[in-house]
Image: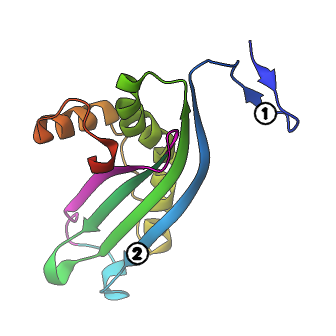
Amino acid sequence: MTDTTSNGAKTAPEGAPALNALVQYLKDFSFENPNAPRSLGPQEKSPNITLQVNVNAQQMSDTDFAVSLLVDAKAGEGENLLFKLDLEYGGVFRLMNIPKDQVHPIVMIECPRLLFPFVRQIVANATRDGGFPPLYIDPIDFVALYQQKLAESGAAGADISKAN
């Protein structure tokens, strides 16, 4: 059963686990098209596109966490660089009534999963507005990314303030 607030939003019953996005924001963004307008014409071959996605999190209070998705993308290399994109998109999330052993996975998996559609759209719009076909990022398996980061750090359930 859910309760309704004065603005019509539904809330979980008292004591039920809850994850709420308090705010989302664009923290840092850069799009470079260094060889325009020459780079906007037909290309002899498809450019090599590289994409890197990272997740950072910082605990702000007992219940609130700042989570950011960092995206670095580029097409081409050296003199043939078509574009370079750097993006940091973040959100502040409130976790209520979550067991302590589940906080880290929720912050590092579920919060980025909620941010991802917005990041994907920003990247697609920026590349399209830069004169290229939109770059649509394939869905990301945040569970696998989380497990990879845990394996690299050698810690199970690492401190949020050190997670990235």
Residue under the image location 35 percent in, 31 percent down: 105
Q: CA distance from mark 1 to mark 2?
A: 35 Å
Q: Quadrant of residue 132?
A: bottom left
The image shows residue 39, relative to residue 75, as above or below, that is below
Query: 21 or 51, which lies in front?
Result: 21
Label 1 CA crowd tier, 10 Å (few <14, some 14–19, many 20+):
few
Q: Quarter of the image containing the N terminus?
A: top right
Residue 95 screen position, x and y as percent:
53, 34
Residue 40 screen position, x and y as percent:
36, 79
Residue under the image location 49 percent in, 24 percent down: 98
Q: Which residue is mark 2?
A: 30
Q: Earlier in the sequence, mark 1 or mark 2?
A: 1
Q: Amino acid at mark 1?
A: Ala
Query: 15 or 90, which lies in front?
Result: 15
The image shows residue 52, relative to residue 16, as above or below, that is below
- Span shown in magenta: 44-64
Residue 15 in sight: yes
Query: 116 or 78, which lies in front?
Result: 116
Q: Which mark is residue 9?
A: 1
Residue 120 screen position, x and y as percent:
45, 52
Residue under the image location 36 percent in, 86 percent down: 36
Residue 23 falls left or right of residue 123: right
Residue 118 in sight: no
Circle 2 SS class: strand
Q: Residue furthest right?
A: 6
